[in-house]
Image (tube, rainbow, N blue to C red):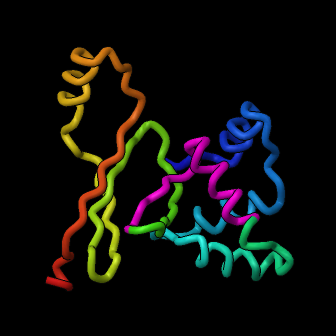
Amino acid sequence: MRLTERKIIAILRERGYKLTPQRRAVLKEIARAHQHLDPAEIYQRVRKRYPGIGLVTVYRTLGVLSELGVICELYTGGNSRSYSMRKPLEHHHHLICSDCGTVVDFTDCGLSELEEQLARKTGFKMETHFLELVGRCPDCQ
């Protein structure tokens, strides 16, 4: 189950943002994709509909949507990042191939017990966690 457009609009409004045509276009391209997209790919796709959009606008939009938890930001090494739609009420993690860049999502990480232990030990109230494992996919081995 993915976030609905109505829910995304509500999240943006709660934090004082509007769903501008540019933000809507970025969201639509991420939602249409069946894989993680990097900012350049998103920019190229959005430019087909909005030729005047700037790369800076795409980066700002990605920053806002990521900060609000609407999209999932994946760090793929160095300063590289890619994005996908976040599934509500379900965290997910990534296996990343260090050779070809293939990304595989998974949800079962078994970190709940560790979170509870750390919360008791440190007094932190955990909100979420991110797990990215890097290795070589079967095709690159």
- Image location of residue 24, percent across then percent down: 75, 58
Q: In terms of depth relative to the viewer, which is nearer, 8 or 111? A: 111
The furthest residue to the left: 141
The furthest residue to the front: 78
- Image location of residue 79, percent across then percent down: 47, 67
Dividing the picture into quadrants, the one containing residue 100 is bottom left
Q: In terms of depth relative to the viewer, which is nearer, 63 or 23? A: 63
Identity of the residue drawn at 59% across and 78% down: 41
Q: The C terminus is located in which quarter?
A: bottom left
On screen, residue 53 versus residue 8, left or right, reads right
Identity of the residue drawn at 38% across and 20% down: 125
Relative vertical location of residue 140 with respect to residue 86 in this rendering, above or below: below
- Image location of residue 60, percent across then percent down: 70, 58
Identity of the residue drawn at 49% across and 41% down: 88
Identity of the residue drawn at 64% across and 68% down: 29
Q: Is residue 90 magenta?
A: no
On screen, residue 32 versus residue 55, left or right, reads left
Relative vertical location of residue 125 with respect to residue 111 in this rendering, above or below: above
What is the number of callouts on the image?
A: 0
Relative vertical location of residue 45 with respect to residue 11 in this rendering, above or below: below
Q: Is residue 69 magenta?
A: yes
Q: Which residues are drawn in magenta?
A: 57-77
- Image location of residue 35, percent across then percent down: 45, 70
On screen, residue 19 versus residue 95, left or right, reads right
Dividing the picture into quadrants, the one containing residue 118 is top left
